[in-house]
Amino acid sequence: MTASRTATPATDSAPPQAAGALGRAATVGELSRSGGRVATWLRAGLRVAWPPVLVAVLALAAWEAWIRVRGVPEYLAPSPSAVADALAADPTRFVGAGAVSLQHALGGLVLGAGGAFALGAVMAHSHRLERALYPFALMVKVTPIVAIAPLLIIWFGFGDTPKYVVAALITFFPMLVNAVTGLRSFDPAAHDYFRAMDASRWQVLVLLRLPASLPYVFAALRISVPLALIGAVVAEWMSADSGVGQLIVIAHGDFDTPALFGAVVVLAAIGVALTGALALVERRLLSWHESVREW
């Protein structure tokens, strides 16, 4: 009994110390796991990024050597170093124009791809409706954007609206076709199970059709992202009031080919960044699909 009473104070004083040690150990463990995940992501990113980076460096080196050896005038084809000097001379101008074009492209992408997916969800449930609406969607696809962009500027003015509309029109058709195909590419056995469970059309859409359509949706987005940038720049070029399109028009008028190529570099950087971000999201959401298992 005496031994038990004397041991009790030591036992009572131990838990706070043990809890602190456990807390510190847990914190160290969490930091270690977080650092491990970051290191894994960095290694995966480097593994994916180094081949195109290497090709880009070799291509730029060959381009620079060809310009210097042949003595090509700058107004015909600037060297990569001249383009870099143009970007470094006024980076704020290029970054600001790129941000405006990015806004126009993303706004048009959300408008066009979102509307196309909603219409595709309706068409996927009705072949009759698909036959009725598909010719009009195809008409939007084959209409030259360059031909109607001036009309959109006349109708909607020189603000942001015509840029959004042009980017939306150019991204509408790829998403519509892929959405209809993807929403119909579900497992028939799973569909029979949903019907046996008396699931509603909304439940079938959300729980069966939508997951099955995700590979097709991401394939459409990989096509639509660069198209949205092209549409935004075309509209900006027509109105010449903002964005990368304005830079291109001004540089073309001044015969400033380094600045013109600098605008193209900014546009390419935005496209690569958006495509890379989309690939990361796709890999996260479609880890179960064979299209991303090789990453």
Image (spheres, rainbow, N blue to C red):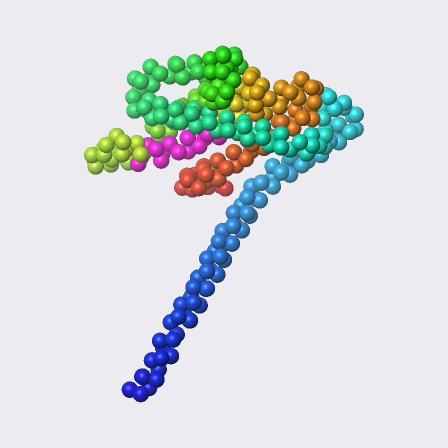
Magenta part, dominant SS: helix
Tell me if 1 is positioned left or right of 13 in this view: left
Q: Residue 7 at x, y = what percent?
A: 35, 82
Residue 251 lies, with reference to residue 147, above or below; the image says below
Q: Residue 161 at x, y = what percent?
A: 47, 21
Picture quadrant where residue 198 is located: top left
Q: Residue 123 at x, y = what percent?
A: 33, 22
Residue 288 lies, with reference to residue 234, above or below; the image says below
Q: Residue at x 35, y 26 (%)?
A: 118
The magenta segment: 207-223
In-front residue for pair 148/121: 148
Picture quadrant where residue 266 is located: top right
Residue 108 lies, with reference to residue 136, above or below; the image says below
In-front residue for pair 96/39: 96
In-front residue for pair 136/47: 136
Residue 143 in view of the camera: no
Q: Residue at x 69, y 30 (%)?
A: 86
Q: Residue at x 72, y 26 (%)?
A: 78
Q: Residue at x 39, y 70 (%)?
A: 16
Residue 287 in view of the camera: yes
